[in-house]
Image (cartoon, rainbow, N blue to C red):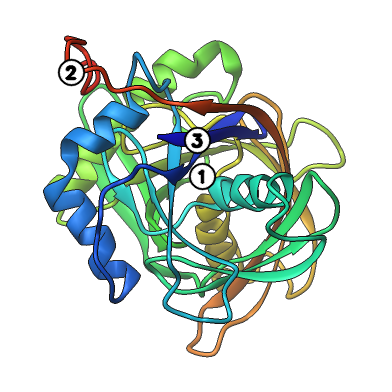
Amino acid sequence: MHVIDSHTGGEPTRVILSGGPDLGSGPLADRARRLAEDHADFIRAVAAEPRGQVAMVCALLVEPVDPGCAAGVIYFDAAEVLGMCGHGTIGLAVTLVHMGRIAPGTHRIDTPVGPVGVVLHDAHTVTVTNVESRRITAGLTVDVPGLGPVTGDVAYGGNLFFIVDPSPLPVDPANIRALTDAGIAVRAAVHAAGSPVDHVIFHGPAVSETDHGRSFVLCPDDAYDRSPCGTGCSARLACLAADGKLAEGTEIVQHSIIGSSYRLSWRPGPTGGVIPSITGQAHVMAEATLIFDPADPFRDGIPA
């Protein structure tokens, strides 16, 4: 299996160029569902240890449905097939230019939630125009063991998020373990309340005069996002716009828990949501051939 690894703001992306399962044709949402339902061993073998790494998102290249798209992609981590992935799209664009498949300029990428736009500014810098994002539920309060009542918004940015602002714990690198445990507990409480979110965001205050805030993002595989999380930033932009806290076209800088950053803005969407713009940088780290030895006892990854 031929792969190229990159990272976006510290968050790894593995682009799978060949050797993946045959998912047939048709809408990418259907192919993503087949990947989730029929190829769990493949997902874990590629994304989980020892072949993968914690927090890795994989990008399986497939034929796009939309002929105007430069590529089709299905994203997944070790736990779940994803609708979209912002950091992964930035990493994919940088990988495609590394391969010589695209040049700086404007392109489109087909995903299971619809085509997204990318502007490749240079070999590392990409702006993603995400799918329309929106707040679904404002001010949902859940009771979380060890934390008490926690209130947040349910919002969609390509994936489903529960966004808590302010965070119940300081959003500081020293608190990553505690924030992870809190995020897992909060997500379970939100699920129990009937909202099937896959990510949790704890938002903290700005750490400098030039940024909007620092966020901790819990991903479906219970790892934290090293980047500011593109789909999470999209969901947050929808909430800020709905609350009248960020004007159309105003750019802000969002930092991750490790200090990497995205530049963000929004414009109105056609059905009442927002169209997010996310600018970040990615760097290619490795190009490799993965080997799946039948004699390897961990050929299908280390069980969770």
| Of the two numbered discs 1 and 2 in the rendering, the one whose residue sits closer to the viewer | 2
Q: CA distance from mark 1 to mark 3?
A: 38 Å
Vertical arrangement, residue 162 with respect to residue 223, above or below: below
Mark 3 and mark 2 residues within 8 Å of each other at the beta carbon = no
**Residue 45 appears at what percent x and percent y?**
27, 27
Q: CA distance from mark 3 to mark 2?
A: 20 Å
At a point 49% along the width and 17% down the height, the residue shown is: 176
At a point 55% along the width and 23% down the height, the residue shown is: 170
Q: Secondary structure at mark 1?
A: loop
Vertical arrangement, residue 17 with respect to residue 119, above or below: above
**Residue 243 appears at what percent x and percent y?**
57, 68
Q: Which numbered tag is attached to residue 165?
A: 1
Return the residue at label 3: 3
Mark 1 and mark 2 residues within 8 Å of each other at the beta carbon = no
Mark 1 and mark 3 residues within 8 Å of each other at the beta carbon = no
Q: Is residue 185 visible?
A: no
Return the residue at label 2: 294
Vertical arrangement, residue 201 with respect to residue 145, above or below: below
